[in-house]
Image: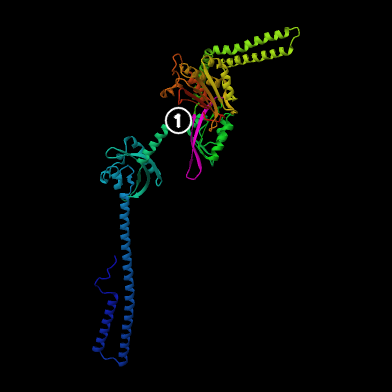
Amino acid sequence: MIRDPTTKSWSAEQWLLGGMVLALATTCIGLLLGPQPAASAHLVALALLVASLTAALLMIRLVGRSQRRMEAMLRGRASSEERAMEALRNSEAQWKEVFEHNPVMYFMVDATGLVLSVNTFGAAQLGYTVDELLGQSVLRVFAAEDRDMVQRNVATCLDNIGQTHNWEIRKVRKDGSRIWVRENAKAVRRLGDQLIVLIVLIACEDITERKHAENALQQSEMYLTEAQRLSHTGSFGWHVASGEIIWSEETFRIFEFDRAPSITHATVLQRVHPDDRARVQRTIDRASLDGKDFEHGYRLLMPNGAIKFVHARAHAVTNLSGDTEFIGAVTDVTARKRAEAELHEAQTNLAHVTRVTALGELAASIAHEVNQPLAAVVTNAAACLRWLNRAAPDLNEARGAVRSIISDGNRAGEVIQRVRAMVNKTTDQKAPLDVNEVINQVIGLVQHELQRHLVSLQLDLAPALPSVVADRIQLQQVILNLVLNGIEAMQPVTDRPRELVIRTRHDEAGQIVVTVTDCGVGIATENAERLFDAFYTTKASGMGMGLSICRSIVEAHRGRLSVTGNSGPGATFQFTLPLHEEDHAW
């Protein structure tokens, strides 16, 4: 206990000074009242008394100084201890404030699970007051189905004292609602009532929002995965700089590869059909250089020999590092390609039927085209015989007649050959051809039909047109159908000349344009597009398939077929054909 320096009591130097004064007074009284000593002895005694008094004063000064130093030191220590106690009280208050109101739930439970302490924030988060939880089982704030897990976790902490364990679990609030928390727990030893007991310290962080976000993300991923599976569409990401490719689960399924964190272009190309690898590599190289979106289609050759058709499309983005990445999708279109092949076969069969039907309508014209050269053959043969039967055969005239026979025979053979070509069922045979030549071949078949219906034909064919890659028979069918439709559209016309104009040109877009213009009854604006629908017809005896098949043929050649009304009477049908067949996505 430190003595208060202000206490009213004598100090050591005061007691010493008092004792010296008392001794001096006693000595003086003894000299005055006692027998008179010798003068020298008296002086010696007096000197000794003065020396003792002086020494006492010096001692008193030294003792006083030491005492003051001791008291100053004690006062400093008392002040330091007081400041330390105040700091301790402030620190305790601050930590208590942190403990009570920190947005983390703190629990302290004993080995049996009873709550020894809980902060105000933790109790409030669960809808309780602190007093309502103290002394209660911690299992009270957990769902019944989770309590076994809680007991196992507490037991694990008790078996591993000093080690931190964490887990995620649901807590039940007082109102019955549930929240997700992440708990960090550690078992420690604590001195109790003269005993060392084990307690578990638990810090709980509310992760309900994060859990909801995770669940929403998982649900979204599940929907996306299922949607990809149902649509046979996988997703991929391609980092151009590193060449790394990330695939979704469905993409691995399409390519029939085992799942891996990433994949390379070399691995992808191994699965691409050998005939398509060069084209796929060109697409990849071009995209990596220009960083632009791309789209292409190619075939996959599977390990079992099966062939798949896929369609890939990718969008270029720039990541945070400034590098180019592609985000894309790849779709297994094998089923669609098979359906398209079956549809194409059906359309080919139907186109063949319409060609044969059209040729049946042109039977008179075809007979006329064949009869003319055959009649010329007979005439020239008779003339040849007359030249040879002369007394002096005229061999030169006979040779001329034979040459005419050969020419007329070839002309008749060409007509028959063109008819046979249109009647025969053949697969697509695309090759470079001259559109003007195809038009002239068709005109040879319909010439008599034009004359029979009093139709004047005008040809405005651009000279030196570039070749187009097309199927000759299919292109002839389109032109034949448009010409016959024009002739039929002008049959009701009696008040003006019946004129049919066929034009060709090379437009600015690099396409060959073919137009067939008539001056017939025209087409109602609302029916213009419906003319190309299957089974739609304006003819009393029509099937409504001719123009539909023509549009399918033109679109198969990457062209477009359309119709517009003329400023005057009649209508104009127009179709375009690209000069080159470019690589395209399936």
Query: In this rendering, does residue 338 appear at all?
Result: no
- Going by the image, does 411 lie left or right of 154? right
> At which x and y percent is residue 452?
53, 14
Quadrant holding the N terminus = bottom left
> At which x and y percent is residue 143?
32, 36
Neighbourhood count class around disc 1 (C-alpha, 10 Å): few under 14, some 14–19, many 20 upward: many
> Where is residue 365, by image quadrant?
top right
Q: Which sits in the foreground, 76 or 112?
A: 76
At a point 27% along the width and 77% down the height, the residue shown is: 14
- The residue stretch that appears in magenta: 304-331
> Height in image: 27 above or below 565?
below
Q: Looking at numbered disc 1 in the image, what kind of residue is underneath it? A: Gln
- Secondary element under disc 1, as helix, strand or loop, is helix
Q: Which sits in the foreground, 523 or 250?
A: 523
> At which x and y percent is residue 371?
60, 11
Residue wearing tag 1: 228
- Going by the image, does 197 lie left or right of 562? left
Q: Which sits in the foreground, 265 or 161?
A: 265
- Going by the image, does 283 lie left or right of 189? right
> Height in image: 378 above or below 300?
above
> Height in image: 311 above or below 521?
below
Q: Would you say residue 316 sits in the magenta stretch?
A: yes
Query: In this rendering, does residue 553 appear at all?
Result: yes
Total marks in image: 1
> At which x and y percent is residue 579?
56, 29
Q: Main secondary structure of the magenta part?
A: strand
Q: Among all residues in the image, which is located at the extreme front?
A: 495
- Going by the image, does 246 lie left or right of 143? right
